[in-house]
Image (cartoon, rainbow, N blue to C red):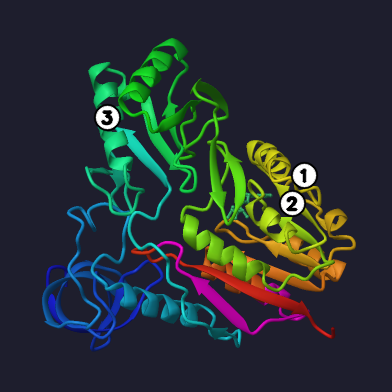
Amino acid sequence: MKNEIVRCVCTDMSVDGHGIARSKDLVVFVKEMIPGETADVKITAEKKNYAYGIIDTLIEASPYRTKSLCPVAYKCGGCDFRHISYEGQLAIKKKLLENTFRGLNVRIEDVVPSPKTDHYRNKVQIPVKDGKAGFYRKYSHDIVEQEHCLLQFEGADEILKDALEIFRERNILDSVRHIFLRKGEGSDEVMLGIIVRKKEIPVWRKTAQEIVRRRPEITTVVLNINTRDDNVILGEEETVLYGPGIIRDIYDGISVEISLKSFYQVNHDQMVQLYAKACSTLNEGESVLDLYSGIGTISLFAARRAREVTGVEIVEDAVRNAKRNAALNHMENVAFFLDDARGDMRKYMQGKDAVILDPPRKGISKELADDLIASGIPKIIYISCNPATLARDLGLLKEFYDFDTVTPFDMFPHTVHVESVVKLTRKGR
Ligand SMILES: C[S@@+](CC[C@H](N)C(=O)[O-])C[C@H]1O[C@@H](n2cnc3c(N)ncnc32)[C@H](O)[C@@H]1O
């Protein structure tokens, strides 16, 4: 079967962006095949009930098919959809959500397009291995070197090129695990993070000075020391090599400070549209709990509407940023707490009219769902970057909460990922 060529018709797409195609009784997951297409497919691997393949000859192309503008698309794991027009990407994401939420009786709205479809990522994390720096090849830890990336913010390519050149000249590239860049779109401030294997401060301080001399758009450089053996990118220990150790950003008139270890949404303009939707159902006079609050970006947005907001977050630096961000914006009706949302959250839920949930990809725990149900919270606004765990968590809540609409936001153009917002209201209210 391997290497055999079979005629296939693609009927759907898998959650990781492969075309799901059929040839008689055989299901084949085909790289870069778009629903609606017919192709002769070369089988690359065979499993018990299905196979993997690549397009050998495209017989009938989808109207959504387009030419990729990226020279390393599909070698590097950054983009899944470079061969699909933007209109097609939005239609496919909506269909993927319809598949995921089948059985929950919800309406999936049209995906809200991203204001920017290229150069929208304000954060870049580049792994370094064996003298090479680039993105990982999909499903592997092989590094694909690239000089120009269409996803990352404009100017990132040049900073990376100069930083790598300096590391190579000084013979210290082998000490680097990752290079991190983040830009505040509203401030133009740029943070360079250098994640290294061991602590050698003097050499990195001099190196940082040279990089900043060459790239004055960098406003701060932070050295992060990570001696772990696993895949976790950031270590605990940090030293500021240059500047204030944070960058600032402004979104919708709100100023924030962001540290290296803090989470910040990658697509600035789409973040504002997402927050506007999430907070649109909050009313004046309401008391709100923002769980997984990061640096407080949603809390501050919500605090302009609600009576008061409490944020809970597990990363210490993010909580420090959040407290400072409340002060920077003269918002006295917000408070932030360092805590783990896997613990008992009922103490924060007392007297709250609404809870905003914005968990990482793994979603919320069964215990947190139970706390929400036991506390009788009247309204939940769930923001999710993973439709599969969102659907699972809605399943946990559906006996006690009504919900009927999923509003998707394209936070990550050219990738298979999609962000969603769902409003839940307590039954019987
Ligand atoms: C998707 S981000 C959302 C952050 C913020 N709402 C925003 O829009 O920028 C998820 C946040 O949850 C935090 N987090 C992860 N696990 C957590 C836990 N067990 N308890 C509390 N916060 C957690 C992460 O540090 C991160 O800041």
Q: Could you tell me which secondary element the residue under label 3 belongs to?
A: helix
At a point 31% along the width and 42% down the height, the residue shown is 155
Q: Position of residue 282 (x, y in %)?
A: 74, 70
Question: In this view of the protein, which residue sits in the foreground, 36 or 272?
Answer: 272
- Tell me which amino acid carries mark 1: Phe
Quadrant housing the N terminus: bottom left
What residue would you read off at disc 2?
311
At a point 65% along the width and 39% down the height, the residue shown is 321
Instruction: Choose the circle earlier in sequence order: 1 or 3.
Output: 3
Question: In this view of the protein, which residue sits in the foreground, 15 or 153?
Answer: 153
Q: Position of residue 19 (x, y in %)?
A: 29, 75
Report the span colored magenta.
395-412
Question: What distance separates the C-alpha of mark 2 from that of mark 3?
Answer: 39 Å
What residue would you read off at disc 3?
162
Q: Splitting the image into 4 quarters, where does residue 174 fall?
A: top left
What residue would you read off at disc 1?
337
At a point 90% along the width and 63% down the height, the residue shown is 351
Instruction: Choose the circle earlier in sequence order: 1 or 2.
Output: 2
Question: What distance separates the C-alpha of mark 1 from that of mark 2?
Answer: 6 Å
